[in-house]
Image (cartoon, rainbow, N blue to C red):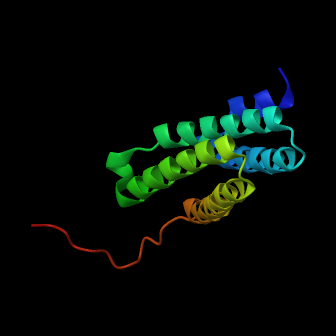
Amino acid sequence: MDYTEQMVKTASPAKLIEMLYQRAVELLDMAERDVNNREYVKANEEIQKCQDIITELNLSLDLEKGGEIAKNLRALYTYMFKTLVEANTKKDVEKIREVRGYLSELLETWREAMKNVGNTASKVPDPNRPRLNVSL
């Protein structure tokens, strides 16, 4: 078992999402380079792998628990997938960059959210804080 496989098998679900975003960005960096170098077969493979990642991210959404955020992510993932189809067909570097930009933003947002969750998850609530009375 190689290092990457070991990382995936031992990663938390949150870390897996981060790893998927990171890999998608890397793939689109390579695809842009390969389109610019006219290595279209390699670019095609990289774009398709990125589409696979986007599909996996899309399928992992829980629309019931995720509410409006999950619905918005579903729409964004669908848009990115379709944009990559067009980018791949036309070998359009601008469309690759557009999707990479979205994925980079999602990666940074995800990392920040995980930092915030990590910071609050380790804190013990103050037992003396005022509580909301919800009794009927």
Residue 44 in percent (x, y) is at 73, 35
Q: Between residues 112 and 68, which one lies in front from this camera angle? A: 68
Q: Residue at x 71, y 52 (%)?
A: 92
Q: Between residues 94 and 126, which one lies in front from this camera angle? A: 94
Res 5 quadrant in image: top right
63 is higher (above) or lower (below) than 44:
below
Residue 128 in percent (x, y) is at 41, 76
Q: How many marks?
A: 0
Outermost residue toward the bottom?
Answer: 130
Q: In the visual, does 19 lie left or right of 81?
A: right
Outermost residue toward the left?
Answer: 136
Residue 75 in percent (x, y) is at 44, 53
Res 3 quadrant in image: top right
Q: Which image quarter holds the C terminus?
A: bottom left
Q: Between residues 77 and 128, which one lies in front from this camera angle? A: 77
Q: Residue at x 69, y 35 (%)?
A: 49
25 is higher (above) or lower (below) than 13:
below
Residue 100 in percent (x, y) is at 69, 56
Q: Residue at x 65, y 63 (%)?
A: 105
Q: Which image quarter holds the N terminus?
A: top right
